[in-house]
Image (tube, rainbow, N blue to C red):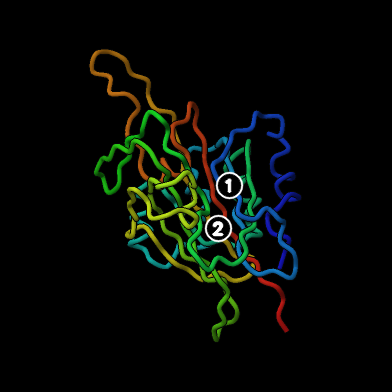
């Protein structure tokens, strides 16, 4: 195993943007420790990048492979989420092919036996219009979350990290924003059709990428406010004043076995 994406790698790829103003990213820091050689599990790195190329996904398609389910891949892309399985060693090349990193967060999760938020975004006080399968919804409160379960399994092909991902929206009964730590949500919706599972070898990763473009300004008596965001755009970005690329890197790490 390698030392994951932690601080050394991140410093190397963000030198050009380390003086930029940091923006708060709504992740849930369950465990902040850097992984050690005696631990199995996954880590999550959230990267915000200023792109220097227009067709970001075309650059990334030279790395790794699509997830196995082509129909699901198309559904995720319809919601603004580009997903790919890659070698973690290719992450610096992927980032450099996109542009300059201006913000990052890193969280080590280990094995996740119960559903846990890997990434979470609070709905803005003014509410948010989102679309899912082309249907518009107005969400006034709550959280959009990417839930996960993950553990180590052994198969004939070797040891793997099993990873399951599921986008959700929920309004908690209590103040806790973490789905697994609160009572039954007051309101919720699980986007089952966008959930998927995969097996990762040591140093393999899943990347979820969303490209955000600043909305076109409008005014006048028929101005309806900000346009609706696709589910992936709302989950991994929201409204931006400039163009950004947000990437979640979910990386597997396995201790050596004899």
Tell us which disc is closer to us: 2 or 1: 1
**At which x and y percent is residue 52?**
56, 35
- Disc 1: CA contacts within 10 A as few (<14), some (14-19) or many (>=20): many
Q: Say which quadrant the N terminus sits in.
A: bottom right
User: With 256 as the anchor, is 174 left or right in this view?
Assistant: left
| Secondary structure type for disc 1 | strand
- The quadrant where residue 156 appears: bottom right
- The quadrant where residue 217 appears: top left
Dot placed on the residue nearer the N-terminal end, 2 or 1 = 1
Q: Distance between the residues labelled 2 and 1?
A: 19 Å
Relative to the observer, which residue lies in front, 190 or 220? 190
- Image point 65% across, 66% down: which residue? 253
Determine whether 38 is above or below 171 in the image: below
- Image point 58% across, 36% down: which residue? 24
Residue on which the image places disc 1: 46
Determine whether 176 is above or below 162 in the image: above
- Image point 68% across, 54% down: which residue? 5
- Disc 2: CA contacts within 10 A as few (<14), some (14-19) or many (>=20): some
Residue on which the image places disc 2: 63
Relative to the observer, which residue lies in front, 224 or 96? 224
**At which x and y percent is residue 115?**
48, 62
**At which x and y percent is residue 235?**
44, 44
**At which x and y percent is residue 151?**
55, 71
Q: Is residue 2 visible?
A: yes
């Amino acid at each position: 195993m390698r030392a994951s994406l932690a601080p050394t790698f991140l410093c190397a790829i963000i030198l050009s943007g380390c003086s930029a103003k940091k923006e708060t990213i709504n992740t849930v820091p369950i465990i902040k420790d850097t992984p050690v050689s005696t631990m199995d599990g996954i880590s999550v790195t959230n990267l915000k990048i200023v792109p220097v190329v227009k067709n970001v996904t075309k650059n990334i398609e030279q790395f790794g492979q699509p997830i196995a389910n082509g129909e699901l891949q198309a559904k995720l892309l319809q919601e603004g989420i580009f997903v790919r399985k890659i070698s973690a060693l290719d992450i610096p090349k992927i980032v450099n092919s996109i542009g300059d990193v201006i913000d990052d967060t890193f969280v080590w999760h280990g094995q996740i036996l119960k559903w846990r938020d890997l990434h979470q975004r609070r709905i803005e006080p003014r509410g948010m219009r989102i679309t899912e399968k082309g249907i518009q919804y107005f969400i006034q409160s709550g959280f959009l979350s990417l839930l996960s379960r993950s553990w180590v399994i052994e198969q004939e092909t070797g040891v793997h990290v099993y990873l399951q991902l599921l986008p959700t929206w929920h309004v908690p009964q209590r103040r806790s924003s973490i789905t697994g730590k609160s009572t039954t949500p007051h309101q919720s919706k699980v986007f089952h059709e966008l959930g998927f599972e995969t097996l990762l070898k040591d140093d393999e990763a899943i990347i979820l990428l969303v490209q955000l473009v600043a909305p076109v300004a409008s005014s006048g008596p028929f101005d309806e406010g900000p346009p609706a965001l696709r589910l992936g755009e709302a989950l991994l970005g929201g409204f931006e004043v400039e163009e950004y690329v947000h990437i979640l890197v979910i990386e597997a790490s396995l201790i050596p076995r004899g």
